[in-house]
Amino acid sequence: MNIDYKAENELLKQHVSAMENKIKKLEKMNEFLQQQVLLARHKRFGASSEKTHPNQLTLSGSVFNEAEQEENSLLPEPELEKITYKRKKQKGKREIDFSGLPTEQIICELPENERDCPECDDSLEQIGQTVYRRELTVIPAQYKVTEYVQVTYACKNCEQNNIETPIKKADVPAPLIPNSGIASPSLVAHIANNKFGLSLPLYRQEKEMKNSNINLSRQTMANWLIYIYRHYFRAFIDLLVTKMLIHDVLHGDETSVQVLHEEGKKAQSKSYMWVTRTSGESETPIIFFKYSPNRSADNPDEMFKNWTGFLHTDGYQAYRNIENVTVVGCFAHVRRYYFDALKSLPTDVQKESAANKGVQYCDALFALERQYKKENMTFNEREKQRELRSKPLAAEFFTWAESELANCVNTKSSFGKALTYTVNQKSYLMNFFLDGRLEISNNRAENAIRPFAVGRKNWLFCNTANGADTSAAFYSIIETAKANGLKPYEYMKFLLVQMPAIPPDRYVELLPWNSLIPDTCKAPVKN
């Protein structure tokens, strides 16, 4: 029997090669799983902040060093974190400003029988008084019935001498909701602010009202909110969108929402809330929420079909092909990828890791932006400084990322994903340098959508598509009011008083930056 040793050796080599490839794949998978475990632990038990640890390394490199020298230190040294107080700080002592609140004084006097002098028995006289302490007292929500009484007038002379008696009746303000006996502007604004501003679901409000002997069902409250949206707020939101699209710098984002009863969809399927808002260059900020049953590119295409400008977004592909729109990428998302990669590593190797270097590049760019803001630069000045200082640093960052990606053994690892995202998003991220009005991140949109995401944890889902549209409208008005320095409840109450009395073509008078907005709607200015 002849044995073909050459063929056997070849088969053996192929088998060894296959096993080596399998081992490499298993090693990569093991590395990936270890990173996911570490990252999951950090997200569950670690600090949620993405702030850079003071012990992380400082980058080297000519461009980075130049920026560092110009700012005296982009990244603070550990010693700067140590704070020495000249005096001992008293715990729990923080001054609260009571100046805007009404004050009631409780005068603490001596009883009549104790106002005699202990030396001569003569009567004591008051010589002064001192505010001994101040307390903040709360009065829980109070409900009262407001009756609109229509006065009727008649002519007594005609009643006695003529066949007919003229009768006049006083005008009565139009009701907010026809055929509703109790829906007032203040009550509906209170319910809406509780639900959309304070994330208090209707069923909890129903329980709270019962404690005041008011039996108002959640179904009735929901009907009121939908009525307000359809008859008043829908036209007002259209006006806000028209005003928003005048600006040529906007931000966009989206998040999921569950709608239980929606035609053609299972209750467990995801729908989406899209948010678009003005940027920092706008003196009249507007935040617009829009509900959609899907996350397709049709949504931004429809939103921006007649608009031309710069749109800040994350890396979602649906925004990428909108005609006449220049997409501006988000360096905060880039940094988050490297930060997650950093936290997926054991603590003892984080400082010297390449992932840490990616975080530091991003931190350097953000530090420059803070410096420009601190110096109160105009948009033109900021554009020139970015071209001179930030753009070379960004170019160095992308060159480093491309080199690291070319040598990356495992592109499916957390670090590999960070590099891939950076390289793929380069063209959109570099659009940030096209105009001084643009921002380094899409944090404005993320901050705008956060109240909705927080509220979603409480109310969990919308019952119907009508409810989702209504929610979008109320969130739009509440967040726009807050962005313009208004109190959401007071502003909504103002709208609900005014809207039944005027046609929609006069809603422009009610925009949150209008000079006609009463002072009661304005929030205290933060010091």
Image (tube, helix red, strand yellow):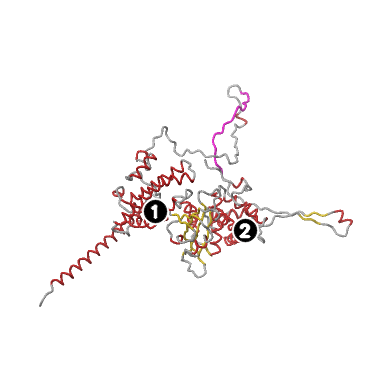
Q: Residue furthest top?
A: 120
From mark 2 to mark 1, how far is it between C-alphas? 41 Å
Magenta span of residues: 121-137
Q: Earlier in the sequence, mark 2 or mark 1?
A: 2
The one nearer the camera, 85 or 350, is: 350
Q: Is residue 36 visible?
A: no
Q: Residues within 10 Å of mark 2 (few under 14, many from 20)?
A: some
Q: Secondary structure at mark 1?
A: helix
Circle on res. 82? none
Position of residue 239 measured from the top left corner of the image (x, y, whole percent): 59, 56
- Residue at point 52%, 69% (across, down): 263
Which residue corresponds to mark 1?
334
Which residue corresponds to mark 2?
232
Q: Is residue 472 left or right of residue 154?
A: left
Q: Residue furthest right?
A: 161
Q: Which quadrant would residue 28 be assigned to in this image?
A: bottom left
Position of residue 117 measured from the top left corner of the image (x, y, whole percent): 60, 24
Q: Is residue 79 visible?
A: yes
- Residue at point 37%, 38% (across, down): 82
- What secondary structure do most residues of the magenta stretch adopt? loop
Q: Amino acid at mark 1?
A: Val
